[in-house]
Image (cartoon, rainbow, N blue to C red):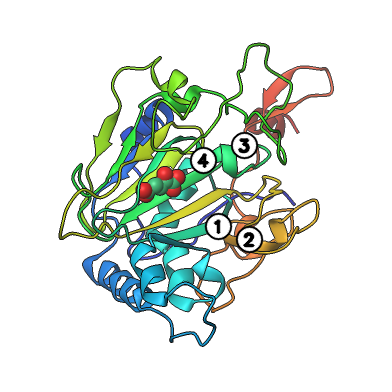
Amino acid sequence: MAYIPKAVERADRYRVKVDEYVHYQRHGYLKVEALLPKEDVQRLLDWAESRRQPPPVSDQPDKAPLEAVFKTQTRIHQLHRIDATAEWGLLHPRVLDVLEALIGPDVLALQSMLFFNPPGLGGQGWHQDAYYITTYPDTLIGAWIALDAADEQNGCLWVIPGSHCEPIYPPTHPYGLMHADGAFDDLFEVENVSHLDDEVNTLTKVVRKYPDPIPVPMQPGDVLFFHGHILHRSYPNRTRDRFRRSYVCHYCNARSWVPWNHGEPYEGDSANYLHILARGSTHLPYASPKFGTPVYLPEPADGNTGAPPRMMGMEDGMMDSVQTAADRV
Ligand SMILES: O=C(O)CCC(=O)C(=O)O
């Protein structure tokens, strides 16, 4: 029987507007305001604060003083593998509602990053996320969940609208796999990607092809969805008294092969089995939520209901609508 993707209904389901879908496809990003309710933002903030506490003092004298580590800590990766709240945030149903429309219906959750960006710290220079996280087919997307208000002063994200149409610019030292390796004639290699200094980061050459980048100010609960190829960056937090906390997660279509992992030794040819199937279905291996966060996967029966394909090839080599074919019998 055919798999016909069909999401499970929920009372608070977010329904993406056609204009939002078009905006994402055309510009490579989409800000959805107030996607997370206030109480969910508060839950993530409380959790972020609990993670920000310095761990117990170490008795190993060679380790850096923990307070110093704590002060310089700007982000923590992959907490969803060890923490129930992080898993809940990564699999937030309203974030997945949008992803289902933009890259789904089958969605695989790959990465979580908790950013603190205290005053004076943080910032990441121009980069494309699919440079780091390869998926085949290339379906990577980020979801940037604002926990604090983010603006130009405390280091909001900046994007270059339309730059998601660029291919991924490869590094000078090949490492791992690159998107469409060898398929382009004039693709140049880049150095020091993500470096804060535009003169050092040679991806800036691509940035300069475009009109001025734009800042994306956010309010707590807003979520910015951004394409895996879009050129984007952030600046260090220039305020004296404000954090810039955010929870940033990455996903791809669950039918993509993912030779990428983070936080474990080499995982073999494919790491799909380490990533969580968040929506839909897949023929590839996947992980289930460790901490029991509900994911709304279709039941096998749901997947097998609905209309058959609308056109079919006829024995005489012509295409015909299924209805007409049925009527002829
Ligand atoms: O939030 C930031 O400062 C940078 C995040 C970012 O660029 C990313 O997740 O790709």
**Mark 3, residue position:** 138
- Give amino acid for label 1: Ala
Q: Earlier in the sequence, mark 4 or mark 3?
A: 4
Left or right: 11, with 239 as reference point? right
**Mark 2, residue position:** 275
Secondary structure of the residue carrying tag 4 is: helix
- Give amino acid for label 2: His
**Mark 4, residue position:** 129
Instruction: Check whether the beta carbons of the residues at disc 2 and disc 3 lie within 8 A of each other.
Output: no
The Cα atoms of the two marked residues, 1 and 2, are separated by: 6 Å
Say if disc 4 is inside 8 Å of ligand 1: yes
The Cα atoms of the two marked residues, 4 and 3, are separated by: 11 Å
- Give amino acid for label 3: Asp
Instruction: Check whether the beta carbons of the residues at disc 4 and disc 3 lie within 8 A of each other.
Output: no
Secondary structure of the residue carrying tag 2 is: loop
Q: Earlier in the sequence, mark 3 or mark 1?
A: 1
Secondary structure of the residue carrying tag 3 is: loop
Left or right: 300, with 215 as reference point? right
Instruction: Check whether the beta carbons of the residues at disc 1 and disc 2 lie within 8 A of each other.
Output: yes
Residue at 17% from the left image edge and 52% from the top image edge: 239
**Mark 1, residue position:** 109
How crowded is the residue under tag 3: few (<14 C-alpha within 10 Å), some, or many (20+)?
A: some
How crowded is the residue under tag 4: few (<14 C-alpha within 10 Å), some, or many (20+)?
A: many
Which percent across, then down, holds residue 88?
44, 71
Say if disc 2 is inside 8 Å of ligand 1: no
Q: Nearer the viewer, residue 194 or 142?
A: 194
Left or right: 6, with 196 as reference point? right
The Cα atoms of the two marked residues, 4 and 2, are separated by: 17 Å
Residue at 33% from the left image edge and 61% from the top image edge: 116
- Give amino acid for label 4: Asp
Q: Earlier in the sequence, mark 4 or mark 1?
A: 1
Which percent across, then down, holds residue 157?
31, 42
